[in-house]
């Protein structure tokens, strides 16, 4: 097993709660490079798409399947990230996809309660043996719609997901019962903090009604033993080449347009998870 950043106690906390925040995993210079890259990256902006959150506001994100050679790839491939994920998965990890969540001031929409595995189950992934890592680019606070979680909910197993606006959300009848039994936690974070969370953890976020943006990059990893049994919108097992932790500063501001890496962008029309879930709903009701 890789020697990541988690202590034995932190691993126990992750197993109990379904998430753990490693504070200051990235230093001020590194996160400044990421922020300056992302917020002035024309290709990232061009590839972004919006999703109706069901309340009249939109969520904006860009999503790509392969990490690439630019600064985004250096974050996703650096040893402090991947080795730590492998501690949690107890297996070799590969890059499942990454995305930039662009929750802009005053207009950034909400994310419905969901489990990531509620989506990825549809892609032929047999086990919930995946880990996502949210890297705070901006401060994430309750005011600007930080992530909120139901602590320990990863132990519930996969919950049925239903279409909500243009999102797929967990069955709210069940979520409301879970809310009565498990503690709600708001995951407030400073730039450079990284939150590692289980694929079955119930999480959501509120609208951003504040004057401050809440951007964050999420890197998602799957375990080698969990190679999907069918082709989906995210890649099957693809060996991940790790880079040393100093690669972020060596690469510096290297945006998507600055390299010829084929990161396999996922366009809005290709993200069919919610549509697939809606189709299943319709079949059940007939």
Image (cartoon, rainbow, N blue to C red):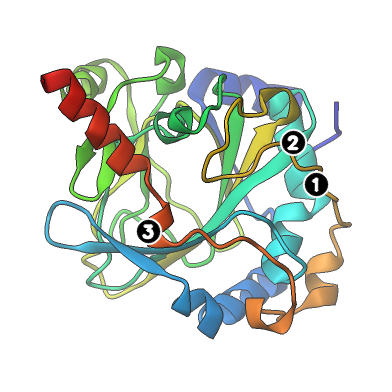
Q: Secondary structure at mark 3?
A: helix
116 relative to 246 in the view: left or right: left
Q: Are marks 1 and 2 in contact (CB under 8 Å)?
A: yes
Can you identify the residue that label 2 sits on? 93
Residues at marks 1 and 2, CA–CA distance in whole angstroms: 7 Å
Q: Which label number is shown at residue 199?
A: none
For residue 83, above or below residue 207:
above
- SS label for mark 1: loop
Query: Which quarter of the rendering shows the C terminus?
Result: top left
Is residue 239 or residue 92 the one in the foreground? 239
> What residue is disc 1 on?
240
Relative to 212, 247 lies left or right: right
* Marks 1 and 2, the one that precedes in the sequence: 2
Name the quadrant containing residue 149.
Answer: top left
Q: Which residue is mark 3?
A: 269
Instruction: Pinpoint residue 190: horizontal percent, then vertical percent.
Output: 52, 59
């Amino acid at each position: 097993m890789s020697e990541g950043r988690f202590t034995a106690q932190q691993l126990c906390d992750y197993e109990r709660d379904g998430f753990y925040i490693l504070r200051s995993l990235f230093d001020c210079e590194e996160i400044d490079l990421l922020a300056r890259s992302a917020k002035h990256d024309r290709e990232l902006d061009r590839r972004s798409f919006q999703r109706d959150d069901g309340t009249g506001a939109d969520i904006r994100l860009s999503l790509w399947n392969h990490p690439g050679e630019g600064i985004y790839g250096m974050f996703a491939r650096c040893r402090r990230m991947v080795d730590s994920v492998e501690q949690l998965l107890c297996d070799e990890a590969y890059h499942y996809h990454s995305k930039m969540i662009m929750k802009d001031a005053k207009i950034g929409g909400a994310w419905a309660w969901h489990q990531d595995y509620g989506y990825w189950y549809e892609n032929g992934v047999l086990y919930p043996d995946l880990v996502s890592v949210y890297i705070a680019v901006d401060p994430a606070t309750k005011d600007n719609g930080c992530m909120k979680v139901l602590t320990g909910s990863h132990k519930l197993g996969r919950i049925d997901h239903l279409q909500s606006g243009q999102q797929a959300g967990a069955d709210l009848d069940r979520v409301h019962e879970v809310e009565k039994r498990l503690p709600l936690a708001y995951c407030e974070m400073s730039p450079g903090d990284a939150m590692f969370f289980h694929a079955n953890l119930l999480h959501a976020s509120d609208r951003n009604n504040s004057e401050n943006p809440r951007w964050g990059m999420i890197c998602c990893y799957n375990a080698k033993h969990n190679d999907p049994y069918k082709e989906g919108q995210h890649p099957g097992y693809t060996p991940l080449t790790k880079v040393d932790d100093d690669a972020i500063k060596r690469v510096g501001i290297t945006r998507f347009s600055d390299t010829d890496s084929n990161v396999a962008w996922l366009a809005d029309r290709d993200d069919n998870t919610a549509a697939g879930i809606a189709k299943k709903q319709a079949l059940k009701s007939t």
